[in-house]
Amino acid sequence: MIALVLGASGFIGSKLVSRLLQQGVHVRLVTRSDNLAYLSSNEQVEIIKMDLLDRTAPFDEIINGCNVIFNCAGELKNINRMRGLHVKVVQNMINACQRLSLKSNCSIHWVQLSSVGAYGKGDGRCRVVTEETVTNPHGEYEITKTDADKIIMSSEGSFTWSILRPSNVYGPGMPNNSLRQLAKIISKRLFFYIGFHRSIATYVHVDDVVSALILCASDQRAKNQVFNVSNDCYLDRVINAIASYYSVSIPRIRLPIPLVRCLVFIVSRVVSLPINQERINALVSRTRYPTSKIEAVLDFSPSKALDSNIEDIF
């Protein structure tokens, strides 16, 4: 099998490549980064150095001979690149897949790394999000990722697909610093709970995401299916685990949501704070992402809970 990996130098993509190589898979990488140069001497690896947004990118050549395509490419910072990378590149690649299938009568399976951001953000109310929940993305990253999902799902011919939507992905080397910032506040004994309901932490370990991606590529039951993957737990379990890691007292103080929002609004106009309205939303969220479907269809469930693997965020 030849697997094409897009976004191979990223947090999730790089770990996916390592796992595929361990399994003896021949991997073709498309990257504009030099971070993967260390793999150039590996006989299992083929590196194509290019920017997929280049108008002259030879998409037919890139996918020729591949059995599966893992699309882990994602632009997190530059908003001007998001639609091009998330939507236009996907459309161009799928068009190439369809042309190839007509010429050689072969089928290519596409595994798309998406996000539960496709369903929108919670506001503190109880919400259970499943694969049947109507998409309602906010923000250019989430909107363009969701648009790409729609293109993939509407594709016809011998082309098949699987879409994996993880919640917040954590693990060694993660680029998202929100958990580390939270841990810093707890270590200084400055953390307090917001609101009087138990909030939900929606995280999934990168190793579990990689396992699910590979399963989507190898299991026939995953074809033309969307799967959410998360390892939800109560936020206070995560807070307690971090406090234990730093050997500090477990936080007990709880303040009303309206009071905290008002204080943050006023004080943030004068000084910079480690918390904002969006962060408050995350800390009071009661959204859940059940893994019932991926468990039933693929016999898969995440194995690494955040509160039991807290050292992986540091």
Image: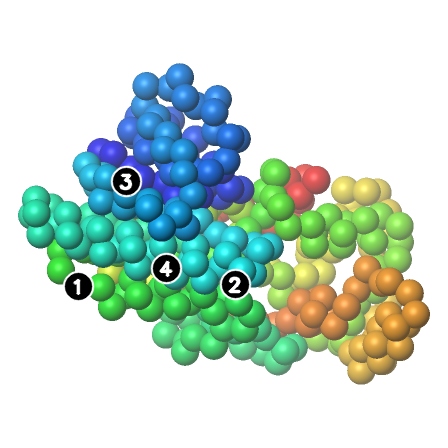
Q: Amino acid at mark 2?
A: Tyr
What distance separates the C-alpha of mark 3 from that of mark 2? 25 Å
SS for callout 3: helix
Q: Which is nearer the N-term, disc 1 or disc 3?
A: 3
Residue at screen point 82% across, 53% down: 186
The N terminus sits in image quarter: top left
- Packing grade of label 4 (10 A; few <14, some 14-19, many >=20) is some
Q: Which mark is residue 143?
A: none
Q: Which mark is residue 88?
A: 4
Which is more foreground, mark 1 or mark 4? 4
Residue at screen point 76% across, 52% down: 181
Which is more foreground, mark 2 or mark 4? 4
The answer to whether marks 1 and 3 mark residues whose Cβ atoms lie closer than 8 Å is: no
Q: Which mark is residue 156?
A: 1
Q: Amino acid at mark 4?
A: Lys
Residue 101 % position (x, y): 12, 50
Q: Amino acid at mark 1?
A: Glu
SS for callout 2: helix
Q: Which is nearer the N-term, disc 3 or disc 4?
A: 3
What distance separates the C-alpha of mark 1 from that of mark 2? 25 Å
Q: Which is nearer the N-term, disc 3 or disc 2?
A: 3
Which is more foreground, mark 3 or mark 2? 3
- Packing grade of label 1 (10 A; few <14, some 14-19, many >=20) is few
Residue 249 % position (x, y): 87, 51
Is any atom of residue 174 visible in this view?
yes
Residue at screen point 43% across, 23% down: 39
Q: Which mark is residue 141?
A: 2
User: In the displayed structure, would residue 192 be above or below residue 112?
Assistant: below
Residue 269 % position (x, y): 88, 73
